[in-house]
Image: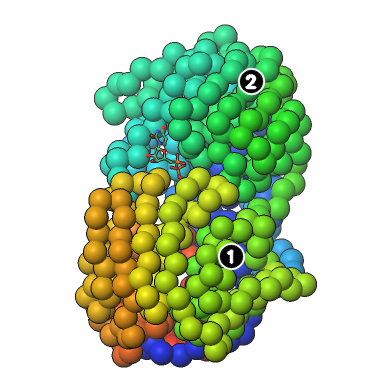
């Protein structure tokens, strides 16, 4: 297995291109199941999670054709054509679904198009129990019959789905996306209330509109969908990854550097921008993105609580904790979205961090220095938080279990090295 070695202590300077958003790309790829025509996605990132979903979609009958690279404002990504001319299987098997929870996003589209679907329950996950009850309840409200059989959700809607008003009891990105896709082909009007407003949900909605769906209220917590009999071909560009952007913004802040994030969208990160400014970073829009610097200001402790969009994202919580380890003063970091999402704490502590966890909150007392150590990643965002800590720490940090990082960060070492970081991948045996 590969490792990443970082020799810390260097301020990062330069420009860094942001890739297409993983969490936007996954539902967009699933949306290809809704039509027999070709969906062309531009700026698709090259990541392990994308390959995992591509494998699942191809066994459902989606033909994929890669069409080289697109270049836009300094960031590049692949162009992929997805065509689900015929659905050859409506079953999403355990072996593929267990690799990635987002596989459950095929349920809504398969049910809407074929009137049936059998999708494995995703199972446990390193950052909490993460149920799928909201997906199931929503689809049942659209008229589906869903039974749980031997670890599978077996869903049927022989007469098709019918629109209704669905009020989500809790904000869920995935459930909103699944229901939104299903509603595009349901009869009549579906109202999704207390819907997630994350930019990835809006990106999906814009793509569905380009495919012929009728959706109002995009970007708000109430989505109104008028069902249509079928969707058609479209070309859609995946938005820039706000979590990758935020991660590298914090890399600039923690090292006392200055990085321009090409393609980065400040409007998708208002909560984080406010927090980083309070912590002492300067953030300014540029022609092609924005720039984050902290060349002479001191890093200060700032309290943070994760919330659904537009609040501070849970997917940046671990990285924020590393940043606060380097601050002058203390910070209280509270996680409200997922239980059990502080697994980076013991690893940061091994590097010299001073962190006390009380339930869903972590009190981080900044320390003058961290020291490099061999560390182990437990999930995607936890691993990248250890990379940030390693960039700040004295000496050498070796990150094990890099496959977590490869699920969500494209060319991480090359992007950081391009800004002057001393970082390299050590190839391991398979
Ligand atoms: C998506 C993101 C993930 C991010 C999360 C929250 C993708 C592929 N993943 O995950 O990176 O951390 O949003 O921003 O886009 N819940 C239920 N029942 C359900 C569904 C969710 O109780 O049926 C709970 C979850 O356990 C969690 C909360 O709702 O506590 C939010 O989860 P959700 O927004 O659904 O996360 P995902 O869509 O899985």
Disc 2 and disc 1: Cα gap in Å? 35 Å
Looking at the image, residue 333 sits to the left or right of residue 156; the answer is left
Q: Is residue 38 visible?
A: no
Question: Above or below — where is 339 with respect to 350?
Answer: above
Q: Label 1 belongs to which residue? A: 273
Identify which residue is drawn at 26% across, 68% down: 355
Q: Where, quadrant-wise, is the C terminus in this rendering? A: bottom left
* Residue found at x 68% / y 26%: 224
Q: Depth check: 375 or 79 in front?
A: 375
Q: Residue at x 34, y 43 (%)?
A: 98
Whether residue 117 sits left or right of residue 85 in the image: it is left
Q: Specify which label sits upstream in the sequence, 2 or 1.
A: 2
Give the class, few, some or many, for how many residues have Cα within 10 Å of label 1's Cα (few <14, many ≥20).
many
Q: Which residue is mark 2?
A: 190
Locate residue 93: give its quadrant.
top left
Q: Secondary structure at mark 1?
A: helix
The color scheme shown is rainbow
Report the front residue among 90 and 379: 379
């Amino acid at each position: 297995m590969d490792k990443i070695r970082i020799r810390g202590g260097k301020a990062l300077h330069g420009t860094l291109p942001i890739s297409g958003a993983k969490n936007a790309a996954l539902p967009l790829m699933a949306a290809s199941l809704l039509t027999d025509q070709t969906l062309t996605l531009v700026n698709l990132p090259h990541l392990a999670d994308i390959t995992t979903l591509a494998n699942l979609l191809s066994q459902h009958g989606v033909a994929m054709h890669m069409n080289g690279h697109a270049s836009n404002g300094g960031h590049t990504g692949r162009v992929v054509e997805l065509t689900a001319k015929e659905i050859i299987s409506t079953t999403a098997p355990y072996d593929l679904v267990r690799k990635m929870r987002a596989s459950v996003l095929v349920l809504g589209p398969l049910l809407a198009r074929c009137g049936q679907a059998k999708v494995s329950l995703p199972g446990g996950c390193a950052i909490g129990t993460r149920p799928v009850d909201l997906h199931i309840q929503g689809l049942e409200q659209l008229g589906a019959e869903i039974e749980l059989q031997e670890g599978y959700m077996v869903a049927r809607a022989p007469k098709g789905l019918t629109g209704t008003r669905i009020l989500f009891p809790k904000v869920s990105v995935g459930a909103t996306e699944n229901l939104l896709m299903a509603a595009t082909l349901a009869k009549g009007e579906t109202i999704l209330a207390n819907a997630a407003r994350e930019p990835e949900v809006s990106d999906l909605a814009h793509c569905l509109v380009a495919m012929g769906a009728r959706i109002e209220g995009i970007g708000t917590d109430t989505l109104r969908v008028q069902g249509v009999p079928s969707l058609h071909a479209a070309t859609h560009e995946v938005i820039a990854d706000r979590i990758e952007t935020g991660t590298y913004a914090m890399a600039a802040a923690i090292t006392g550097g200055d990085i321009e994030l090409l393609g980065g969208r400040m409007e998708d990160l208002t909560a984080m921008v406010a927090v980083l400014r309070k912590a002492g970073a300067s953030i300014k829009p540029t022609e092609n993105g924005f720039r984050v610097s902290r060349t002479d200001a001191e890093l200060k402790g700032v309290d943070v609580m994760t919330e659904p969009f537009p609040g501070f994202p849970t997917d940046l919580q671990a990285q924020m904790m590393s940043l606060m380890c380097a601050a002058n003063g203390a910070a209280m970091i509270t996680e409200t979205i997922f239980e059990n999402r502080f697994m980076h704490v013991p690893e940061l502590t091994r590097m010299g961090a001073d962190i006390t966890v009380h339930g869903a909150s972590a009190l981080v007392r900044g320390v003058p220095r961290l020291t490099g150590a061999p560390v182990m990643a437990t999930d995607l965002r936890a691993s990248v938080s250890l990379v940030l800590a390693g960039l700040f720490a004295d000496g050498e940090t070796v990150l094990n279990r890099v496959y977590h990082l490869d699920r969500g960060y494209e060319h991480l070492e090359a992007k950081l090295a391009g800004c002057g970081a001393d970082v390299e991948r050590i190839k391991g045996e398979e």
